[in-house]
Image: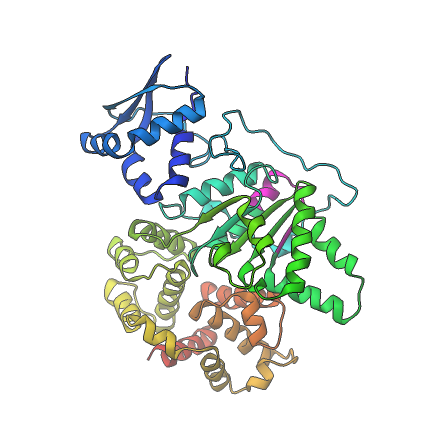
Amino acid sequence: MASPNLWQQVLATLEIELDPAAVSTWFRNTQLYETSEDKIIIACTDSYSKSIIQKRYADKIADIIRQIEQRKYSIDFIVKPLRVQTPVHGPLFDEAPDLKASPLATNSSPTTYTPRESSTMSIQRPEVGLLNPQMTLDNYVVGPSNRVVHAAAVSVMENPGHIYNPLFIYGSTGVGKTHLLHAIGNGILENFSSYRIMYTTSEKFVNDMVEHLRQKKDMQQFRSRYRTCNALLIDDIQFLAGKESSQEEFYHSFNELQQIGSQIVVVSDREPSQIQGLTDRLISRFKGGLMVQISPPDYETRLAIVRTKAEELQINLSDAIYEYIAEQSSQNVREIQGTLLQVKSLANTQSQPINLAFVRSVIEPKADVQTVQKRITPELILELVTRQFDTSIKDLCGKKRKKEIVLPRQMTMFLLRNELGMNLEEIGEVLGGRDHTTVMHGCDRIKQAIEQNNNPLLRSHLHHIRQELYG
């Protein structure tokens, strides 16, 4: 008799081997209907889906089932309404396959994993401050473009170091990679509260290494920081390209973490083989786990994202406005959030009701996105901030911490983050080499002031700067 979660395993494998959009389109309303000693019946809700699945995917399904169950079944498809089932935990993987051997190598139940004891492993309280607690899977919108990586993230959170190690996530700018990376860290902490999680970027890794060398610090201290964690989450790995000494150091850190059973999750804007200047042995290490791409969201997913982000910002919009923003938005999730934030900000500063006409007036001037992106630069934002607050670029990028300097500096951080989509490390470099936690704090201060509606002068400054940017 086939295992009860067989169909979930089949769907998981199909999404890895086929186009996830095709799987979502044809298989979302299917289920395992009946099994016997030699036959498996799959139910579809309509005859058209049944016909497509039989014609295009029947042989593939039969092959997958044969590999999972280690025996041959005849496969039949019928048209039946969906039966109510007890929800399974996670979107796809009831049990995560061991991809090192094959996506279908096991049908045993997952086990909770505890890292092996090691003389170099010290279990400490996690470095919670490095993770954004607001970025969790609870507010991560799942659609066809990211369903596989979401399922892989759930598996990693439940069995860190044991399944998909390393997990390599790649995709274009603004599709939610960093959100997912923080969510994995927060999920591991929720399940394993004593774990030490190290979140960093490849740029920060390089800077830490350079600083230790420059100040002639003990390199063992640097290595211990990165090699004694239960999970290493590293963002923007593509910036490690061309830095041979840093790659050497990271390679050995990677190996040691794997040997002691620590989870490694790597994020990049492209797959490893496309990162020029990355050593072959690192590319090989990254390909040794599960590599999953996050594609740009389709319309339905963008619509769900708009609704979720609007709820987070406490903006009540009509269905027509939700749909309009989803239609007009690019495939960049960060831009969707920026659009909503701008709508709310301008509505507050201008005391305008948020109706469709108002939202159109906000979005349509930005229709030519390429022209706007060519015109808006970090230098322009710094210039507009200094003009609006009557200060200087030297002060913005300097060490002064007077209130009249801190506020425009934080406004600059906020604008660079939301209008240009720059990451925290990039913003820190623009503003004189500030730490990413300082930048995060500055962005949060401006965001809170806008949302709490308790600083009309600040809102006025923001409104005038944005008028200059998009006018």
Q: Residue at 52% of width from left, 65% of height from top?
A: 423
Q: Residue at 78% of width from left, 57% of height from top?
A: 220
Count of marks overlaid on the render: 0
Q: Residue at 49% of width from left, 25% of height from top?
A: 107
Side of 137 where 62 appears, left or right = left
x then y, percent, for residue 318: 27, 55
x then y, percent, for residue 306: 35, 55
Q: Quadrant of the C terminus?
A: bottom left
**Residue 257 in magenta?**
no
Quarter of the image for residue 442 reads bottom right
Instruction: Answer whether residue 270 is visible to the viewer in this image.
Output: yes
Q: Residue furthest left?
A: 47
x then y, percent, for residue 16: 41, 40
Q: Residue furthest front?
A: 280
Q: Residue at 80% of width from left, 68% of height from top?
A: 216
x then y, percent, for residue 449: 50, 67
| Magenta span | 186-199
Quarter of the image for residue 36 reads top left
> How did the renderer colour the structure?
rainbow
Residue 117 higher or lower than 196, as above or below: above
Q: Residue furthest top?
A: 37
Q: Quadrant of the N terminus?
A: top left
- Residue nearer the viewer, 32 or 244: 244
